[in-house]
Image: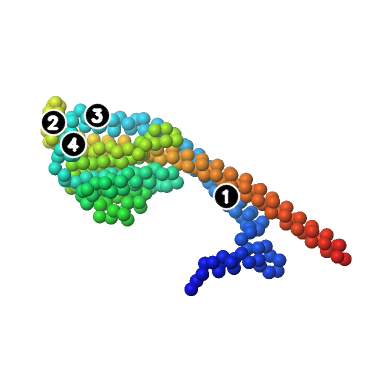
Amino acid sequence: MYCLSSKLITTSTPVVFGVQTRGMATLKDIRVRLKSVTNIQKITQSMKMVSAAKYARAERDLKSARSYGHGAQAFYEKTDLVKAEEAPKVGTLLIAMTSDRGLCGGVHSAVAKKIRAVMKTDENAANIKIVCIGEKSKAMLARQFPNNILMMFNDIGKRPPQFTDATIVANAILESGLQFNEGILIYNKFKSVVSYITTEMPVFSLSALSGSPKLNVYDSLDDEVLKSYYEYSLASLIFYAMKENACSEQSARMTAMDNASKNAGEMISKLTLQFNRTRQSVITRELIEIISGAAAL
C-alpha cells in the first residue's frame, strides 16, 4: 500500500555529495520563480491598461443604452402587467447574462449563484428554462442543470455588445416556442468603478402583455403592433442588460488585474530578499570552506 507519510520522510532526508537539502529552494529555483512572477506582473499590468481603455468605452456606451432598458421598463410599469402569481403557472424563463471571458473577479459566478438560488427555492423548478448568454454561465450551469438549459450563446464579451446581438437572442427565445408567464433576466448592474450589483429584471410574455388591464389607454394597438413592440422591448431589455454587464465586467477586470499586479509586486520583493539572503549564505559557506582548507594546510 502506498504510504504518504513515508514519502514525506523520504523527501526531507538530506541528499549525499553535499547537495542542498531537498525542499529548500536553490538560487536557480528562486531566480526562475522570480523571473516567472515578473513576467506575470507585466501581463497583469498590460491587461489592466487594456481593461481601463475598454471600461472607458463601455461606460460611454452605457449612458446611451440605458434609455432602451428604462423605456421598456416604464411601459411595463404604466400598463400594470399581470403578475405571475395571478396567472396560471405555465413556466419560468431565466436569462443568465455573462460573457466568454474570465479574470474579472466574481462577476460571472454571482449570476450563476443567483440562478442556483432560484432553482433551489422554486417548487416548480422542473418547468424552469435557462438561457445562457456567454460561455461562463454555460460552464457553471450546464453540468448542474442539463435538463433546464433551453439554449446557449457564445462569442459574447470579445467585442462591445451591439443591438444586433440582443436581437439574435430575443428572436431565438421567441422562435423557441417556449410558453412562460414569468421571466427573470439576471445581470450585473454597474454602480461604480469598484462595485456592481447582481440584479434581477422581470421579463414578461406576450400573453401577459396583451392581458394587462391598462393597455387600452394606448390607441391603435392591434395584435400585430403589440407583437412587434413586444419583440422590440425584449431585445431592448437584453441589450440594456448586455451593456450594464459589459461595463461591470470591464471595471471588475481592471480592479482584479490591479490587485494581481500589487500581489505580484509583493511576491517579487519577498523573492528578491530571499534570493539575496540565499546568495549571501552560499558565498559565506564557500569562504568558510576556503579558510578552513587553508588553515588545515
Q: Amino acid at mark 4?
A: Lys
Q: Amino acid at mark 3?
A: Ala
- For the residues labelled 2 and 4, the Cα–Cα distance comes to 11 Å
Check contact, mark 1 vs mark 3: CB within 8 A. Answer: no
Q: Which residue is mark 1?
A: 37
- For the residues labelled 2 and 1, the Cα–Cα distance comes to 63 Å
Quick one: 165 or 198, which is closer to the camera? Answer: 198
How packed mark 3 is, by other alpha carbons closer than 10 Å (few <14, some 14-19, many 20 or more), is few
Q: Which residue is mark 3?
A: 74
Identify which residue is drawn at 42% across, 32% down.
192
* Badge 1 element: helix
The image position of residue 118, as x and y in percent, is 28, 45
Which is nearer the N-term, disc 2 or disc 1? 1
The image position of residue 39, as x and y in percent, is 57, 49
Identify which residue is drawn at 59% across, 44% down.
266
Kindly identify which numbered label has been placed on residue 213.
Answer: 2
Quarter of image, res 6: bottom right
- Disc 3 or disc 2, which is closer to the eye? 2
Vertical position of residue 143 compared to residue 109: above or below: below
* Badge 3 element: helix
Q: Which residue is mark 4?
A: 83
Which is nearer the N-term, disc 3 or disc 2? 3
